[in-house]
Image (tube, rainbow, N blue to C red):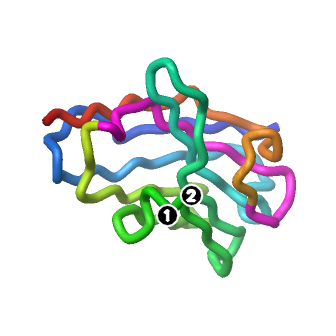
């Protein structure tokens, strides 16, 4: 069993930056691919970024490439999402997710564990 707890959300002005953290419990973190998704009001949850266990494979959605950076610290059992140049339309609840295996994925259905989410609000 893996438990995920996100933190770092908040209110930021357009163009600003935030760093989200996701602390994971469980022995399998260092062998699990991790992902970030987001869900805006009235919209489906959407893929943002994913990272393989050692960080050798990373994927981003086209909308965040060049502005967001995913990383992880396997000693601290934590995955991060550094977000910069934030836009108002990126206001959403951001979720951390863990896969049962090492391959990265962009589909919600391929993740086994989810955090409760952290709210990010970008004001214009």
Where is residue 11 shown, x and y percent of the image?
21, 33
Question: Who is closer to the viewer here, 103 or 5?
Answer: 103
Q: Residue furthest top?
A: 42
Q: Residue at x 48, y 37 (%)?
A: 94
Quadrant containing the C terminus in the rendered view? top left
Q: CA distance from mark 1 to mark 2?
A: 7 Å
When asked about the image quadrant of residue 88, the answer is top left
Q: In this picture, which residue range is highlighted in magenta?
A: 89-104
Where is residue 38 shown, x and y percent of the image?
51, 38
Where is residue 56 shown, x and y percent of the image?
66, 81
| Relative to 4, residue 99 above or below | below
Mark 1 crowd level (few <14, some 14–19, many ≥20, 10 Å Cα): many
Question: How many numbered circles are shown?
Answer: 2
Question: Who is closer to the viewer here, 18 or 7?
Answer: 18
Q: Residue at x 35, y 40 (%)?
A: 90
Closer mark to the observer between disc 1 and disc 2: 2
Q: Which residue is disc 2 drawn over?
A: 49
Where is residue 102 shown, x and y percent of the image?
81, 65
When asked about the image quadrant of residue 29, the answer is bottom right
The numbered dot on residue 57 is none
Image marks 1 and 2: residues in contact by CB distance under 8 Å: yes
Relative to 24, 14 lies left or right: left
Relative to 30, 64 lies left or right: left
| Relative to 19, residue 104 above or below | below
Q: Secondary structure at mark 1?
A: strand
The numbered dot on residue 70 is 1
When asked about the image quadrant of residue 63, the answer is bottom left
Q: Is residue 122 magenta?
A: no
The earlier-in-sequence mark between 1 and 2 is 2
Q: Is residue 90 magenta?
A: yes
């Amino acid at each position: 069993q893996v438990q995920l707890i996100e933190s770092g959300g908040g209110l930021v002005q357009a163009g600003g930056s935030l760093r989200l953290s996701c602390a994971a419990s469980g022995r399998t973190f260092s062998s699990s691919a991790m992902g970030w998704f987001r869900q805006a009001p009235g919209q489906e949850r959407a893929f943002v970024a994913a990272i393989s266990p050692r960080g050798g494979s990373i994927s981003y959605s086209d909308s965040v490439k060049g502005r967001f950076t995913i990383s992880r610290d396997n000693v601290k059992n934590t995955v991060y999402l550094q977000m910069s140049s934030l836009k108002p339309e990126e206001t959403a609840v951001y979720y951390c997710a863990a896969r049962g295996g090492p391959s990265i994925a962009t589909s919600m259905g391929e993740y086994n564990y989810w955090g409760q989410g952290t709210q990010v609000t970008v004001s214009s």
